[in-house]
């Protein structure tokens, strides 16, 4: 395939220390029933043998699809996704993590359903299910048939849970890149999905196209500590949910409580949001949760950050 040739789908894999699973991702793509896609792999500073395995994959002259491989210093997932959006040659972007693998009909299924959104500028993506290694669907999916909704309503109103394959129009994704916050490498992905949901819908297809990996990593094994270390991006995520009136009031209050939890660690001024009732209601519980965290961790530096925040009238 010519490197400049346009493809319909960019399958993007962010790679970080996955020497045991990255080849399985490659094998799953080689088993696809059609080849109208490219595989874009960005190595975010792996310290194991992941890079060596990718170099060997690139030497496979029998590979039926084009591979773009970029190795860079560790910058975190959000910057890596932004880089993928810039480099994508596809019309659609399908993220397949480095411990996942695509089902054999994944690409064909995406292409068959692309017609549902191709000419509709109000729809940004096709969203499919994921399954576990035992064949069961990940989480709860509320729709038995094809349904149009948006990312926010899907999680709040319809109470959906579990990982999904949001196959996004690249042109839309380029309007909603992840914030790159100095000193931080992560923010909850829901920040972008919620922003997109205010302008676009998605088509939900009740069919799995990939198997979700279960590797234990630095994020999933200790979510709280990871979010606290990236507290500005995390507090921004919860603040935007609390301010978003399309969500139920109860859901907004719960997320306002979580906002306080991380805003204190970030040293943010909280007085700017106190004029909104949802934050006033959430404040007492938000303080209790933060103090409980502080006592549990016994980290006095975090307490001083909270005190600074309370007296920072910006």
Image: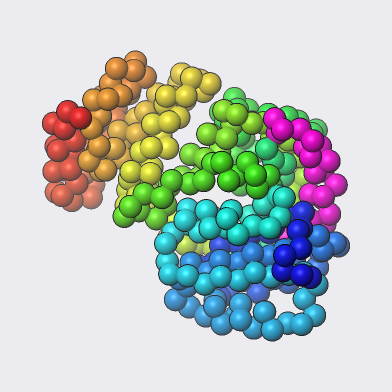
The image shows residue 86, relative to residue 49, as above or below, that is above
What range of the chain is rendered magenta?
102-123
**Res. 35 image quadrant:** bottom right
- The reply to whether residue 136 is visible in this rendering is no
Q: How is colour applied across the structure in the image? A: rainbow
Quadrant location of the N terminus?
Answer: bottom right
Q: Residue at x 29, y 27 (%)?
A: 285
Q: Residue at x 44, y 76 (%)?
A: 47
Measured as percent of width and height from the top left, residue 274 is found at: 28, 21
Q: Is residue 117 magenta?
A: yes
Measured as percent of width and height from the top left, residue 73 is found at: 43, 69
Measured as percent of width and height from the top left, residue 24 is found at: 68, 71
The single residue placed furthest to the front in the displayed view is 4
**Res. 140 image quadrant:** top right
- Direction from residue 284 to residue 68 in the image, left or right: right
- Direction from residue 232 to residue 45 in the image, left or right: right
- Direction from residue 281 to residue 199 in the image, left or right: right
């Amino acid at each position: 395939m010519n490197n400049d040739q346009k493809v319909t789908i960019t399958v993007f894999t962010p790679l970080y220390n996955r020497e045991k699973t990255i080849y399985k991702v490659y094998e799953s793509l080689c088993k696809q029933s059609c080849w109208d896609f490219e595989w874009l792999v960005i190595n975010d500073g792996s310290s194991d043998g992941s890079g060596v395995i990718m170099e060997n994959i690139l030497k496979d002259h029998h590979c039926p699809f084009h591979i773009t491989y970029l190795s860079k210093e560790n910058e975190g997932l959000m910057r890596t996704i932004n880089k993928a959006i810039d480099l994508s040659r596809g019309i659609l972007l399908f993220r397949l993590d480095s411990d996942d693998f695509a089902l054999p009909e994944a690409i064909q299924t995406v292409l068959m359903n692309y017609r549902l959104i191709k000419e509709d500028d109000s729809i940004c993506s096709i969203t499919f299910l994921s399954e576990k290694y035992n064949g069961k669907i990940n989480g709860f999916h509320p729709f038995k048939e094809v349904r149009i909704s948006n990312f926010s309503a899907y999680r709040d109103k319809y109470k959906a849970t579990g990982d999904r394959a949001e196959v996004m129009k690249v042109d839309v994704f380029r309007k909603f890149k992840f914030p790159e916050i100095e000193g931080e490498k992560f923010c909850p992905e829901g920040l972008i999905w919620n922003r997109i949901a205010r302008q676009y819908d998605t088509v939900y297809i009740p069919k799995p196209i990939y198997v979700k990996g279960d590797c234990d990593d630095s994020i999933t094994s200790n979510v709280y500590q990871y979010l606290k270390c990236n507290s500005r991006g995390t507090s921004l995520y919860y603040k935007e949910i609390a301010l978003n009136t399309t969500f139920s009031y109860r859901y907004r209050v719960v997320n306002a409580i979580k906002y306080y939890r991380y805003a204190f660690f970030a040293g943010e001024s909280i007085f700017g949001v106190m004029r909104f009732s949802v934050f006033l209601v959430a404040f007492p519980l938000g303080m209790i949760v933060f103090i409980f965290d502080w006592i549990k961790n016994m980290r006095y530096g975090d307490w001083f950050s909270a005190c600074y925040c309370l007296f920072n009238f910006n």
